Amino acid sequence: MRTENQKAWFFVLPVLLLVAFNALVPIMTVVNYSVQETFGNNVFFWQGLDWFEQILRSDRFQAALGRQFLFTFLILIIEVPLGIAIALSMPRQGFWVPVCLVTMALPMLIPWNVVGAMWNIFTLPEIGLLGYLMNNTLGIPYDMTQNPFAAWVTIITMDVWHWTSLVVLLSYAGLVSIPDAYYQAAKIDGASPWKVFRYIQLPKMKTVLTIAILLRFMDSFNIYTEPFVLTGGGPGNSTTLLSIDLVKIALGQFDLGPAAAMSLIYFAITLLVSWLFYTLMTKDDVK
Amino acid sequence: MAKITLSNLRHSYLANPKGPEDYALKEIDLDWMDGGAYALLGPSGCGKSTLLNIISGLLSPSEGRILFDDQDVTALAPDKRNIAQVFQFPVIYDTMTVRENLAFPLRNRGVAASKIAERVAEIAALLEVEEMLDIRAAHLSPDNKQKISMGRGLVRDDVNVVMFDEPLTVIDPHLKWKLRSKLKELHQRVKATMIYVTHDQTEALTFADQVVVMQDGEVVQIGTPVELFERPQHTFVGHFIGSPGMNLLPAEESSGGRVSFQGQGVALEGPIKGAGGLTQIGIRPEYVTLGAAGVEAQVRKVSDVGRHCVVEAIAGPTLVKAIVPGDPPLQGETVHLGFRQDQTRLYRDGWVATEAAT
């Protein structure tokens, strides 16, 4: 008879405990809240899937979700091509490489709330460098606290400023890993610069780009701190993204049930889109 | 198809080279005959890849000219020279199928689709890769990838020269043989000039009609594999080619053209040329015999390599290797070394200094 060694479970146990306490238990708490109603005093009433239905049907949630997708879409179509372009134009060797890399990494090292505060001051019409320049020197009305369009331009620019570096650094890592022979062979084969990009550089960057896009999607989809510090979701609700709305419901209105339901929906969307994207990008990979 | 002439070629990777030591290539004058199979043999860092990249146009030489059929191409870009190069690691366009890979150089040059299809079919048949044509190239094994990168070179019918830069480095040993004979066969069928760069003497000697041996940016000898083995012009060739390489023994030269080793006179293949400098006796282990008379030596090590034994014996401070076909002596035994006269020559400062035996 074949005996199975079950000792391996003991080695998995610590990880299992860790995951349980940092992921499973908190999520189950949220699940718990999402199907119940409470009026305090630790008294709970079974609510079923009512909160989910209510959230999904609400105009407020749908609007925030729309804004969220728009924001993520806009920053992705700006940051990805821009990041690739910058990576392509960076030097591959020599004195300037570390200079470029460190310069690129700087924005990412700044804490998120500091980024929000920086851009807030930067764009103030009266004292901010950009705000003053636009309004008083160039005469272009620009006030992100009043004008939704200006607010959107500001949060998009801020995110591009903050996070394009991530795409740059990952793309650059992909680019420098391409052996010289590829470029030499392409030269001999008479390939145009576009074809070199299309058939050599882009395929070789695909893996790192997939990771870069995935990270940028998840981060931007869950973004909270920077727009919260910068616009607080305003003017009006124009820059109220999902997480800002969520915090308003959970901590502002203290509606724990709907907030929990919304968290789960939010989480499911992030997970679903990430999974779809990753599966699509890696489906025809070798091995 | 063209004859390739390198004239007064020098190259340095430094901006302002001063002495000869700053040059990766020192003064090269070479003619590569149309349709020849050449090997460029030398240790790593001897400048062979530099030379190859200069011929293909990936590097432009610091000095000198490159002529294809007497036409100066020194200033031409690689794609204008009609050359093909196969690299150490197979270069494959991963996202394309094998067919698209083979067609790529033709498409870039705007060749008509019907002509492309015809050429691709021809090359695929030649390389025996027809059944792989519609597979994504990324899925191929390394040897097939290398075949495809060769195919991309051969697909153009106007190709002047096909250059191979250590193409078998990443190929499994048992496939190396197959690919190497494939190359030889291709050369006979395509009739293009082929230059094969390698540091592996077996690869060079089996592939080429003419082997160019390089050391420290210089061509030391050009010859057929037999010539390189039988009569090395330079101690480097003697040492680099052969397994084990040539014995180089310190020689004492006395007046009257006599040369001795360990106090015993050594008969050379012919009269000595020149005088002075560092002199060495060069003899291949194949021609060292162990007998009753000769230089006394003590056996240090005997290695049985199958068909014969390599005996290492020490004569004074000098280690001498001999290839012994029959029963080898035992370790520690005293033997007497004999040198076959017509294969014993004197080298002066590295270069051969005896006249050939007639």
Image: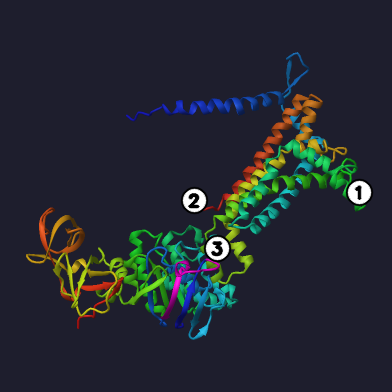
* Residue under numbered circle 3: B96
Q: Is residue B242 above or below residue A18?
A: below
**Kind of element beneath mark 3:** loop
Q: In this view, does B155 lie above or below B330?
A: below
How much space separates mark 1 and mark 3, taking CA atoms? 53 Å
> Where is residue B286 shown, x and y percent of the image?
19, 68
Which amino acid is tagged 2?
Answer: Lys
Q: Is residue A140 visible to us here?
A: no
Which residue is the extreme one toward the top? A41
How much space separates mark 2 and mark 1, taking CA atoms? 57 Å
Instruction: Give me the disc on residue A135.
Output: 1
Pointer 1: residues within 10 angstroms few (<14), some, or many (20+)? some
Q: Is residue A34 visible to us here?
A: yes
> Where is residue B327 shown, x and y percent of the image?
10, 60
Which amino acid is tagged 1?
Answer: Asn
Magenta-drawn segment: B14-31
Instruction: Give me the disc on residue A287.
Output: 2
| Label 1 and label 3 in one chain | no
**Kind of element beneath mark 2:** loop
To which quarter of the image does residue B356 belong?
bottom left
* Residue appearing at x 62%, y 69% in the figure: A192
Q: Which of B136 and B344 is in front in this view?
A: B344
Is B24 magenta? The answer is: yes
Q: Nearer the viewer, residue B318 or B225?
A: B318
Which amino acid is tagged 3?
Answer: Met
**Kind of element beneath mark 1:** helix
* Residue appearing at x 19%, y 83% in the figure: B358
Is B30 magenta? The answer is: yes
Chain to which the residue tagged by mark 2 belongs: A
Q: Which of marks 1 and 3 is in front?
A: 1
